[in-house]
């Protein structure tokens, strides 16, 4: 067994850790204390039990008499990768450290990536290199790797909680943001503030708990409704707000040839993740202009809307939905390229109801482990790329467990979540903009009807009927990437940013890593 780890790990004799966590008693643990927490573990059973108790952003590798145990946090923000090569297993926190030259593309993973912007299961784009998936740990012995799940969002009907949920959520929010404040420890908090509920909840709770060292920023046109709401929220709470226009920056800089951006692509892509572009300019600007302090903590609102029911609602997932129907919806959520029957069958198998768990929870479990942890959360790596820390309050276990057991009827159109926040938090603070940028039940029904009709149409016609508003300047950012693809004979089938960046990244990987 050989480890190829970055400098940021705390290393013991047979244990390696990095990051931070809170234990079951909400004790904050990092550095040497985190090392001590794991150092005495000798069995897989004890290891599994321990990581289930922890809350935070961390990685751990332990050597035992039976082999090696390794895991990352449930959000997938700190992934680990492994490879067997020349009868030896290599484990690393940087996938590029595992490359051996003249690599070949995994064709199944390539199909995944083009359609989903992430790879399914443990695969990466390179044959033979795998990742330890979010919410799983690996047991490695004699160069054989076995993975096991340590967290699931699937629940049984008898686990639904309807008892005093308003009070329970109030207590959960106080606990979660109390932990967040302890972790931040007086440092500057930077919140990417949208017009929606998730990031607004973050600034509202921090304000309520008297944490004032906060700045906010929003990407987009200063006159858009999204920016107007964000500015109003920040002003009402007394927090400084910055509006960042990507269009102006994109006209000054061709990202496809920018040295920093190309380095960032390796860092965030890791041969399996989406390449996020829209936040690159903003974080770089905040750092270069001295607005973001050197030890600032970015706290984005990933992924409260999904926990509250947005994905299952807009896709009309019920207790009667079949796995094949849910697979179609997973693909529709990502791209118009999502008409690959083989990929649909693969997702169907992953969504199969293995036990009598609620079908809505099966769907949410897949979305959280894949779309959110592998796709959405890869966006947070732009903050760490520029040297900043990250906190994800919606991935706090207490938050996850609350929404996991919430009655599905209360997740319809995020009913409980929105009503609670408007009446109990936003309303009293004067920052409730009820109805603005919020889909109605009728909107959701129309979305389902439109999706069904588009599914029946030829791809070219379906694409021509789809016009997503460009709210964050993506058209200007993507122009040089489209131009570069055209130069090498790669045509895009849609104007979808996901497809454009997936094609570009795949081209980069093939050109730079694979034999020709």
Image (tube, rainbow, N blue to C red):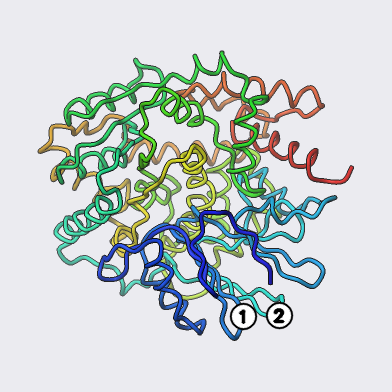
Residue ID for mark 1: 67
Q: Please name the residue shown 48% across and 31% down the image.
A: 279
N-term-proximal mark, 2 vs 1: 1
| Res. 353 in view | no
Residue 54 found in image quarter: bottom left
Q: Position of residue 81 (x, y in %)?
A: 63, 60
Q: Please name the residue shown 37% across and 67% down the image.
A: 33
Q: Position of residue 473 (x, y in %)?
A: 50, 21
Q: Position of residue 334 (x, y in %)?
A: 56, 42
Dot 1 crowding, Cα within 10 Å, few <14, some 14–19, many 20+: some
| Res. 493 in view | yes
Q: Are marks 2 and 1 in contact (CB under 8 Å)?
A: yes
Distance, label 2 to label 1, CA atoms, is: 8 Å
- Is residue 72 toward the left or the right of residue 228 in the image? right
Element type at mark 2: loop
Out of 60 and 125, give the one closest to the viewer.
60
Question: Which mark is drawn over residue 252?
Answer: none
Residue ID for mark 2: 142
Number of numbered discs on residues = 2
Q: Position of residue 472 (x, y in %)?
A: 46, 24
Residue 222 found in image quarter: top left
Out of 98 and 309, give the one closest to the viewer.
98
Quadrant in the picture for the N terminus: bottom right
Quadrant in the picture for the C terminus: top right
Out of 311 and 229, give the one closest to the viewer.
229
Does 439 sit above or below residue 353? Answer: above
Q: Please name the residue shown 81% across and 26% down the image.
A: 488
Dot 2 crowding, Cα within 10 Å, few <14, some 14–19, many 20+: few
- Is residue 124 toward the left or the right of residue 241 in the image? right
Element type at mark 1: strand
């Amino acid at each position: 067994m050989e480890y190829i780890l970055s400098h940021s790990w705390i290393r013991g004799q047979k244990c390696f850790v990095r990051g931070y966590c809170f234990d079951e008693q909400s004790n904050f643990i990092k550095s040497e204390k985190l090392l001590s927490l794991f150092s005495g573990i000798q069995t897989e059973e004890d290891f599994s039990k321990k990581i289930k108790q922890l809350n935070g952003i961390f990685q751990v590798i332990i050597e035992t008499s039976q082999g090696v145990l390794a895991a990352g946090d449930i959000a997938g923000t700190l992934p680990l990768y492994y490879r067997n090569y020349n009868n030896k297993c290599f484990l690393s926190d940087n996938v590029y450290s595992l490359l051996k030259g003249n690599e070949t593309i995994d064709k199944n993973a390539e199909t995944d990536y083009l359609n989903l912007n992430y790879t399914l299961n443990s695969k990466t784009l390179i044959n033979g290199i795998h990742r330890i998936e979010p919410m799983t740990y690996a047991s490695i012995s004699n160069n054989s790797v076995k993975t096991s799940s340590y967290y699931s969002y699937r629940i049984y009907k008898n686990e639904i909680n309807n008892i005093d949920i308003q009070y329970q959520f109030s207590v959960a929010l106080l606990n979660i943001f109390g932990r967040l404040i302890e972790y931040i420890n007086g440092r500057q908090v930077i919140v990417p503030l949208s017009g929606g509920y998730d990031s607004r909840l973050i600034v509202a709770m921090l304000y309520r708990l008297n944490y004032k060292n906060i700045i906010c920023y929003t990407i987009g046109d200063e006159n858009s409704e999204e920016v107007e709401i964000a500015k109003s929220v920040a002003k009402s709470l007394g927090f400084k707000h910055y509006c960042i226009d990507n269009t102006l920056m994109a006209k000054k800089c061709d990202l496809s040839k920018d040295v920093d951006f190309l380095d960032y692509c390796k860092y965030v892509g890791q041969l399996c993740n989406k390449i996020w572009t829209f936040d690159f300019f903003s974080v770089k600007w905040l750092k270069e202009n001295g607005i973001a302090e050197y030890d600032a903590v970015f706290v984005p609102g990933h992924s409260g809307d999904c926990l509250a029911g947005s994905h299952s609602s807009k896709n009309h997932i019920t207790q009667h939905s079949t796995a094949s129907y849910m697979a179609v919806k997973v693909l529709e959520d990502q791209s118009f390229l999502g008409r690959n029957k083989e990929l649909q069958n693969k997702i169907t198998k992953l969504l199969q109801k293995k036990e009598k768990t609620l079908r809505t929870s099966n769907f949410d479990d897949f979305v959280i482990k894949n779309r959110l942890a592998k796709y959405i959360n890869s966006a947070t790596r732009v903050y760490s790329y520029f040297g900043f820390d990250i906190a994800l309050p919606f991935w706090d276990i207490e938050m996850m467990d609350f929404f996991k057991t919430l009655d599905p009827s209360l997740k319809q159109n995020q009913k409980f979540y929105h009503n609670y926040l408007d009446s109990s938090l936003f309303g009293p603070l004067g920052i409730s903009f009820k109805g603005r940028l919020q889909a109605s039940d009728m909107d959701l029904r129309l979305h389902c009807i439109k999706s069904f009709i588009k599914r029946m149409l030829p791809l070219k016609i379906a694409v021509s009927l789809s016009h997503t508003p460009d709210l964050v300047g993506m058209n200007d950012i993507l122009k040089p990437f489209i131009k570069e693809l055209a130069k090498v004979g790669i045509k895009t089938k849609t104007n979808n940013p996901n497809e454009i960046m997936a094609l570009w990244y795949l081209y980069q990987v093939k050109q730079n890593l694979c034999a020709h």
